[in-house]
Amino acid sequence: MDSFDIKSYKTTFLKSANELINNIRLNLSTAGENGELRRFFHNLKGQALFMKLDEIGYISLTGQKLIENYINNKMQLDETAKKTLIEIIDKIDLSLKKYESINS
């Protein structure tokens, strides 16, 4: 059996990750469904870890946990929390751009 070549999946991963980032931004700006927001972070986390991009995976996990805390009434999704989520998204976006440029 041939081994899977992660580099061959790069284009698909980057397209999917950028779509997830855009969905997260849109969801935050329109006060969309928080379950969807959690799912977007969860999917991004899984894809990043599959690609062995641990930094992106763990940053995504932080966003996922923050939303889970809100869904479970452990915190408010106030302006401070939204600012934190935007910072998380920006870090992920920067890491994706770095990955894309390094591995072109």
Image (cartoon, rainbow, N blue to C red):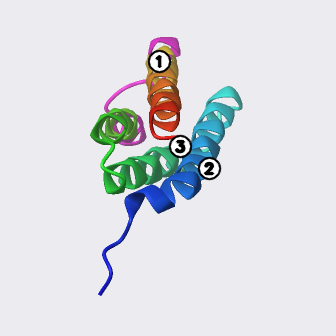
Q: Is residue 94 left or right of residue 26?
A: left
Considering the numbered disc 1 on the image, is that residue within a helix, a strand or a loop? helix
Q: Residue type at mark 3?
A: Leu
Q: Which range is magenta?
A: 67-80
Foreground mark, 1 or 3, reads: 1
User: Looking at the rendering, in which quadrant would you find the N terminus?
Assistant: bottom left
Disc 2: which residue: 15
Residue 87 is a magenta residue: no
Give me the disc on residue 87: 1
Give me the disc on residue 78: none
Q: Is residue 20 left or right of residue 46?
A: right
Q: Residue at x 44, y 19 (%)?
A: 81
Instruction: Give the spatial CA distance, label 1 vs label 3.
Output: 15 Å
Considering the numbered disc 3 on the image, is that residue within a helix, a strand or a loop? helix
Q: Residue at x 52, y 37 (%)?
A: 100
Disc 3: which residue: 37
Foreground mark, 2 or 3, reads: 2
